[in-house]
Image (spheres, helix red, strand yellow):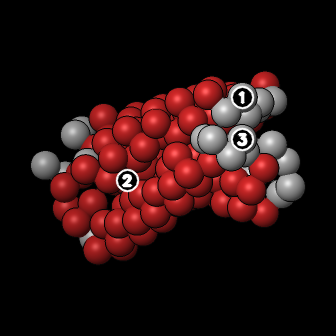
Amino acid sequence: MAIVLAHLVVSMVHGVAHTQAHVPLSLAANLFVYIVILTGPLIGLALTWRTPRLGSWVIALALAGSLVFGLVNHFVVSSPDHVAHVDPHWRPLFATTAVLLAVTEALGAVLAAKFLASGRARKNSTR
């Protein structure tokens, strides 16, 4: 739960950096951000209360997808969304939050996958 909430906070701060640095996103990228990156982990967290296995799957997939999206857009593809191309005034906040997003996404996806692999998700689904 803490990782999902930390990811949400970092995402919000990163969004501020995006806005202030005037880093545009396409409609498809915006939809991905709102549906997968912001909403996906929260839906997964809500689902864990009733169906831990399903909720953990949603968290793992949403955060893994978010990780790939962020790594590609912030560190690989040369675009306005790449950390090296952001307005120098906003670059430190943008880059720091991009790294923190990658950390929370990787950690959250791995923890959710470990929970699924542990068998505790199955045991908790039968309660």
Q: CA distance from mark 1 to mark 3?
A: 8 Å
Q: Is residue 96 above or below residue 80?
A: below
Residue wearing tag 1: 22
Between 60 and 124, the one lying in front of the other is 60
Instruction: Between label 1 and label 3, give the one nearer the viewer.
Output: 3
User: Disc 3 or 2, which lies upstream in sequence?
Assistant: 2
Q: Are marks 2 and 1 in contact (CB under 8 Å)?
A: no
Task: Name the residue located 29 percent from the left edge and 74 percent from the top edge.
Answer: 118
Q: Amino acid at mark 2?
A: Ser
Q: Position of residue 43 (x, y in %)?
A: 40, 34
Residue wearing tag 2: 56
Q: Amino acid at mark 3?
A: Asp
Q: Secondary structure at mark 1?
A: loop
Task: Name the residue located 53 percent from the left edge and 30 percent from the top edge.
Answer: 16
Q: CA distance from mark 2 to mark 1?
A: 34 Å
User: In the displayed structure, does residue 84 sit left or right of residue 10?
Assistant: right
Q: Position of residue 59 (x, y in %)?
A: 43, 50
Dot 2, crowdedness within 10 Å: few (<14), some or many (≥20)?
A: many
Residue wearing tag 3: 87
Q: Is residue 99 above or below residue 97?
A: below
Instruction: Between label 3 and label 2, give the one nearer the viewer.
Output: 3
Q: Are marks 1 and 3 in contact (CB under 8 Å)?
A: yes
Q: Which mark is residue 107?
A: none
Q: Confirm whether residue 58 shows in the render.
A: yes
Q: Secondary structure at mark 3?
A: loop
Dot 3, crowdedness within 10 Å: few (<14), some or many (≥20)?
A: some
Q: Position of residue 9 (x, y in %)?
A: 37, 38
Q: Secondary structure at mark 2?
A: helix
Q: Amino acid at mark 1?
A: His
The quadrant holding residue 75 is bottom right
